[in-house]
Amino acid sequence: MTEKQTKIVNQTVKMLQISEDEAGQRIDNYLLAKLKGVPKSLIYRILRKGEVRVNKGRIKPEYKLQSGDVVRVPPVRVADKGEAPISKNLNKVASLESQIIFEDDCLLVLNKPSGIAVHGGSGLNFGVIEALRALRPEARFLELVHRLDRDTSGILLIAKKRSALRNLHEQLRVKTVQKDYLALVRGQWQSHVKSVQAPLLKNELASGERIVKVSEQGKPSETRFSIEERYANATLVKASPITGRTHQIRVHCQYAGHPIALDDKYGESEFDAQMRDFGLNRLFLHAFSIRLEHPKSGEILRLTAPLDKTMKLVLQKLRENQ
């Protein structure tokens, strides 16, 4: 491999001391964040070969870092794929700045547009987190608190401190965070269906695509629903997930007999064609509100993210068509 075909991510041996804010994370995750662009396989290789050391000793990938630990990071070379993918998408990256709905020293909340993944991988060049890191090169720490599907828009939490990430993960674990979504679904949602409890089983295809189905072998899952607005052949519902499974709201809507408009995995083609006639060109699922405790102050934060122009226009046309 020639010099032009490689890039040096880490030019010299580095000795990095773990701060209190960085403590608690696994060494493999720490290295993935520090050595951006380095494949996971290479990171696990340098761990396995003992090239990464903590306090001069070999460690396993699952080792949890402690405050004051000194990490030895070796020089790392990776294949250079040419122009960075983010630089080819500068307009999309820059537009994310205008979608920030809340920010302070430990938390950033974004109204994520539909069509952009939350992170790169699975054939995608980059995602929201890579874009934010490119926009904020001075930021020492930026990590996703949770995920949204690529085609789902709305509220996305990004932690700016390790302590905030730990706090928010704990809130999600004990289910004190309330997330509400808006979904446009086929037909007339029945008023008495206020909750869907159906176990969900995730399958990953050879292509890397994830498909979820209701199955007794799946994990317990619950979504609560309420009707926001009715139209001639569709209903706008509020969906509040109690559990946080992959594609949960989408599959629960399908299971209830009311698939979401323009859902390419779980939708219904005739309904989708009708919604396209009203100008819809994306999945109609939007994370519009969240309630949580601020990870530092403990005060209750209630945040909302407006629908995009396309969704607002489609709803207006549906009202006029009653």
Image: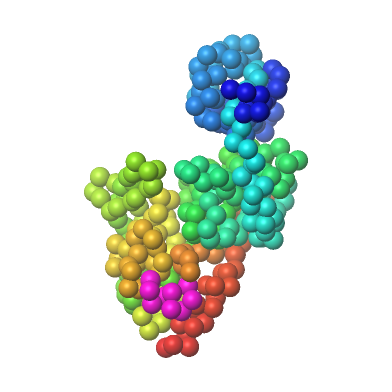
Residue 226 highlighted magenta (yes or no): no
* Residue 296 pos. (x, y %): 67, 46
* Residue 8 pos. (x, y %): 67, 26
Q: Which residues are magenta?
A: 272-280
Q: Image quadrant of residue 309?
A: bottom right
Q: Is residue 242 above or below residue 18?
A: below
Locate the C terminus and report the quarter of the image it occupies. Answer: bottom left
The residue closer to the viewer here, 314 or 16, is: 314
Q: Is residue 203 above or below residue 242?
A: above
* Residue 217 pos. (x, y %): 25, 45
Judged by its main secondary structure, the magenta piece is: helix
The residue closer to the viewer here, 150 or 7, is: 7
Q: Image quadrant of residue 57?
A: top right
Q: Is residue 93 left or right of residue 224?
A: right
Residue 274 highlighted magenta (yes or no): yes
Residue at image point 32% right, 63% down: 254
The residue closer to the viewer here, 66 or 297, is: 66
